[in-house]
Image (spheres, helix red, strand yellow):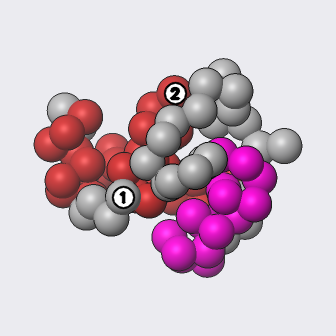
């Protein structure tokens, strides 16, 4: 089971909602470069090649339930 930090989980949820790097950065008060670091870390953790496969693998691991935007507290470290 993949474990995520709270920030990684926030970025994952916002990516799944279709937000851009810039939009995620504005929502979280972080730079685009920092969001890219989190995105790249997520891609590595899930062994995903792109955001689409990242979201698919996160869904398969149970990170979302009944809608991609609902956050879960069980996978946050």
Determine whether, in the image, residue 14 is placed left or right of residue 44.
Answer: left
Q: Decide: few, some or many residues near mark 1? Use Cα within 10 Å; few <14, some 14-19, many ≥20.
A: few
Q: Which of 64 and 25 is in front in this view?
A: 64
Q: Nearer the viewer, residue 58 or 30?
A: 58
Marker disc for residue 66: none
Q: Nearer the viewer, residue 35 or 63?
A: 63
Q: Residue at the location (19% across, 32% down)?
A: 29
Query: Is 50 included in the stretch rendered in magenta?
Result: yes
Q: Which of the 4 image quarters holds residue 49?
A: bottom right
Find the magenta span and give its range: 49-63
Question: Pointer 2: what residue?
Answer: 6
Is most of the magenta stretch helix, strand or loop? helix
Residue 60 shows in this picture: yes
Residue 8, x across and y down, in percent: 51, 39
Q: Decide: few, some or many residues near mark 2? Use Cα within 10 Å; few <14, some 14-19, many ≥20.
A: few
Quarter of the image containing the C terminus? Answer: top right
Placement of 27 over or under 32, stated as above or below? above
Return the residue found at the far right.
1
- Tell which tag, 1 or 2, sits nearer the viewer: 1
Question: Pointer 1: what residue?
Answer: 17
Residue 44 shows in this picture: no
Residue 27, x across and y down, in percent: 19, 39
Decide which of tag 1 and tag 2 comes sooner along the chain.
2
Mark 1 residue element:
loop
CA gap between label 1 and label 2 equals 17 Å
Q: Residue at the location (64% across, 68% down)?
A: 56
């Amino acid at each position: 089971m993949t474990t995520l930090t709270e920030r990684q989980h926030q970025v994952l949820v916002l990516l799944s909602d279709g937000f851009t790097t810039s939009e995620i950065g504005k929502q979280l008060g972080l730079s685009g470069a920092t969001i890219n670091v989190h995105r790249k870390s997520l891609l590595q953790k899930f062994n995903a090649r792109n955001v689409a496969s990242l979201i698919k693998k996160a869904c398969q691991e149970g990170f979302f339930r009944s809608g991609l935007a609902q956050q879960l507290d069980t996978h946050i470290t």
